[in-house]
Image (cartoon, rainbow, N blue to C red):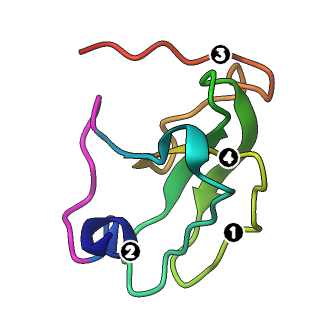
Amino acid sequence: MRQRSRGLLGTPRLGPGECLLISGGAVRLGASVHTFGMSYPIDVLFCDSRWTVIHRIIAMPPNRVSRWVVRARHVVELAGGTVDARVVEGDRLKLLG
């Protein structure tokens, strides 16, 4: 829970291919993220339990809070500018290890 609330705060900018994955599993009842105290923008993908993108934020600036995404079970945070226009709501993510 502590890592979840801290997120990317105080970390260096993410590099290519890096992300922070916050997974709540099947019981999670929504999610939101914030960028208070951060020095760089992030891209955010909110996904349902099947990893379908249900909301996306491109280049969320520092010191902002996202809306509450009720059906979100997983959140992927990436460096700002990583997610391009080809990733849209309804796309399904595939995680590669």
User: What residue is pinned by disc 2?
Assistant: 5
Q: Residues within 10 Å of mark 3 (few under 14, many from 20)?
A: some
Which quadrant would residue 90 be assigned to in this image?
A: top right
Q: Position of residue 14 (x, y in %)?
A: 27, 49
Q: Residues within 10 Å of mark 2 (few under 14, many from 20)?
A: few
For residue 72, the mark is 4
Q: Position of residue 71 (x, y in %)?
A: 76, 46
- Considering only order in the chain, which callout, 2 or 3, is on the residue closer to the N terminus? 2
User: Could you tell me which secondary element the residue under label 4 belongs to?
Assistant: loop
Residue 14 lies left or right of residue 31; in this view the side is left
Who's the residue at 49% across and 63% down the image? 41
User: Could you tell me which secondary element the residue under label 3 belongs to?
Assistant: loop
Q: What's the residue type where badge 1 is placed?
A: Ser
Q: What's the residue type where badge 3 is placed?
A: Arg
Q: What's the residue type where badge 4 is placed?
A: Ala
What stretch of residues is rendered in magenta? 10-18
User: What residue is pinned by disc 3?
Assistant: 92
- Considering only order in the chain, which callout, 4 or 2, is on the residue closer to the N terminus? 2
- Considering only order in the chain, which callout, 1 or 3, is on the residue closer to the N terminus? 1
- Considering only order in the chain, which callout, 4 or 3, is on the residue closer to the N terminus? 4
Identify the residue at the far front of this view.
27
Which quadrant would residue 19 be assigned to in this image?
A: top left
Distance from the alpha carbon under mark 2 to that under mark 4: 16 Å
Residue 10 or 70: which is nearer the viewer? 70
State yes or no: discs 3 and 4 in contact (Cβ < 8 Å): no
